[in-house]
Image (cartoon, rainbow, N blue to C red):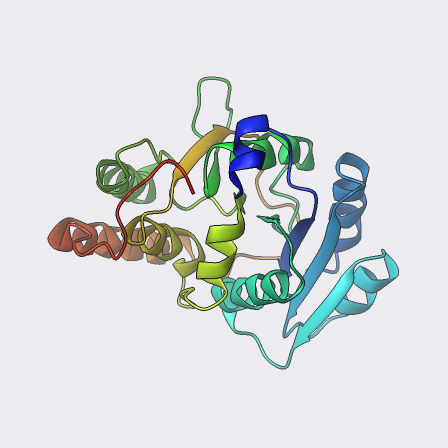
């Protein structure tokens, strides 16, 4: 983000809302309509991640630009495509919104406005006014991962698996070429990469809902085991070897 943008606090002029979608015919049109209601100035890109239903056609009919992948590569691979699209088309900000209706587009301004002071803004569902609940082993693993990443970031990351997040120019440039495609790479892995490269990461409170349509790609136990493994890996490595010094000014 430019110094002028940071100092004035004004919102980036060219914003891309990226929506990765895999078999989301039940919700995609409504999500696009709600995004447009709250941010009519933003361009909407749906990355159709190898859907076997009519997600792509419904997204296009709703007015979004659609890029279709030939087979399912997961959210990480779909978002890598979105970041490459954003870089090639000179967008100043990208915000990820899930296609299943979990993210509330009413919070788009809050997530995007945070880019006035950061390169990546993570929307956290864990705050005093939130009704969102995650329990059991998955929650324990998330707490451990949160503490590990927050210490390395030198700032709070209370919801490291949140996919509701925005990226400014430095993050777009980085993620267009270096973005993990494995499961949860778009959340945990991308934060680790951003911290290593000295990007500024902040978080803001947002509202999230439970999935209304479709099904998650992994079950809760599998997710908890993966998060636990990721936490141990981060603790072991300490995120050593940042390639650039940390700075609050891009």
Give the percent coordinates (x, y) of residue 229. Answer: 22, 56
The residue closer to the viewer here, 178 or 24, is 178
Residue 114 in view (yes/no): yes
Give the percent coordinates (x, y) of residue 4. Answer: 57, 35
Q: Residue, x 87% and y 61% (percent of image)?
A: 61
- Outermost residue on the top side: it is 128
Number of numbered labels in the structure image: 0
- Outermost residue on the left side: it is 236
Quadrant of image for the C terminus:
top left
Image quarter of residue 50:
bottom right
**In this picture, residue 182 sits left or right of residue 70:** left
The residue closer to the viewer here, 228 or 248, is 248
Q: Is residue 246 above or below residue 193?
A: above
The residue closer to the viewer here, 117 or 208, is 117
Q: Is residue 174 above or below residue 198?
A: below
Give the percent coordinates (x, y) of residue 60. Answer: 83, 63
Q: In this view, does 86 lie above or below 138?
A: below
Residue 23 in view (yes/no): no
Give the percent coordinates (x, y) of residue 204. Answer: 49, 29
Image quarter of residue 107:
top right
Q: Residue, x 33% and y 44% (percent of image)?
A: 138
């Amino acid at each position: 983000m430019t110094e002028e943008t940071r100092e004035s606090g004004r919102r980036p002029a060219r914003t891309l809302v990226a929506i990765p979608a895999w078999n989301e015919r039940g919700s995609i049109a409504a999500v696009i309509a709600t995004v447009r209601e709250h941010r009519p100035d933003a361009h909407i890109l749906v990355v159709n991640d190898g859907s076997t239903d009519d997600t792509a056609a419904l997204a296009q009919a709703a007015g979004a630009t659609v890029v279709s992948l030939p087979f399912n590569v997961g959210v990480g691979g779909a978002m890598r495509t979105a970041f490459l699209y954003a870089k090639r088309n000179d967008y100043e900000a990208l915000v990820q919104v899930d296609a299943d209706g979990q993210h509330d587009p009413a919070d788009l301004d809050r997530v995007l406005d945070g880019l006035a002071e950061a390169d990546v803004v993570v929307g956290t569902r864990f705050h005093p006014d939130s009704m969102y609940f995650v329990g059991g082993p998955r929650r324990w693993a998330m707490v451990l991962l949160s503490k590990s990443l927050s210490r390395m970031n030198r700032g709070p990351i209370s919801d490291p698996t949140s996919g509701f997040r925005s990226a400014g120019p430095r993050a777009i440039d980085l993620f267009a070429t270096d973005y993990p495609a494995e499961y949860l790479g778009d959340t945990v892995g991308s934060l680790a990469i951003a911290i290593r490269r000295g990007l500024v990461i902040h978080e803001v409170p947002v509202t999230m809902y439970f999935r209304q349509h479709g099904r998650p790609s992994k079950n809760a136990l599998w997710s908890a085991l993966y998060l636990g493994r990721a936490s141990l890996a981060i603790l072991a490595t300490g995120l050593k070897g940042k390639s650039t010094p940390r700075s609050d000014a891009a």
